[in-house]
Image (tube, grey):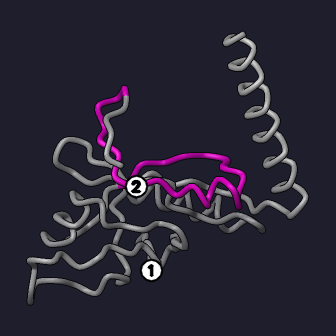
Amino acid sequence: MAQNNASGHKSIAQNRKAFHDYFVEEKYEAGIALFGTEVKSLRAGQVNLKDSYCEIRAGELWATGIHISPYEKGNIFNRDPLRDKKLLMHRREILKLHELVSRKGYTLVPLSLYFSGSNVKVELGVCRGKKLYDKRETDAKKQAGRDMARAVKEGARE
């Protein structure tokens, strides 16, 4: 699950469902305020971004629905796995995101979590919802790509 990519970030989790349900228009990076036991759970890969989203409340950016499982050795220091987590960005960036999201049909969705050095970062996407026919079209393109790759691979064997 954890892997290093070209930019030196160690990936923790991806939100694949977001790419299925939304068109990602723009991407942003934000820090996330966590407690020690939550970071230890992230290092163990115990996180789920599936049904998470972000909202702006009182000029602050909050992530809702990120499930970080309790750290098994954390005892009394464990926090609620589904508590809202504060995202850290400059005020100008938050205002810009607020303008983008206030348009009809747009939402903020966490796309991935990763370590940048010792800090945990969240990649946010300004997303527009897909209709059912868009999802079908995307699935058909992916399947066609898989079929072509399979045909090329089988042709190379012969």
Question: In the orientation shown, which residue stands out farthest toward the front?
Answer: 158
Q: Residue at x 38, y 80 (%)?
A: 84
Residue 24 falls inside the magenta stretch: yes
Q: Say left or right for 38 vs 124.
A: left
Q: Residue at x 80, y 47 (%)?
A: 138
- Name the residue tied to disc 2: 13
Q: Quadrant of residue 34?
A: bottom left
5 in relation to 89, above or below: above
| Element marked by disc 2 | strand
Q: Residue at x 33, y 61 (%)?
A: 88
Badge 2 density bin: few <14, some 14–19, many ≥20, Cα 10 Å: many
- Name the residue tied to disc 1: 58
Amino acid carrying label 1: it is: Ala
- Spot occupied by residue 93 in the image (x, y as percentages of width and height): 46, 54
Disc 2 versus disc 1: nearer the observer: 2
Q: Earlier in the sequence, mark 2 or mark 1?
A: 2
152 in relation to 64, above or below: above
Amino acid carrying label 2: it is: Ala
Magenta region: 6-30
- Spot occupied by residue 68 in the image (x, y as percentages of width and height): 32, 73
Q: Say left or right for 51 vs 155.
A: left
- Spot occupied by residue 61 in the image (x, y as percentages of width and height): 43, 69
Question: In the orientation shown, which residue stands out farthest toward the right?
Answer: 133
Badge 1 density bin: few <14, some 14–19, many ≥20, Cα 10 Å: few
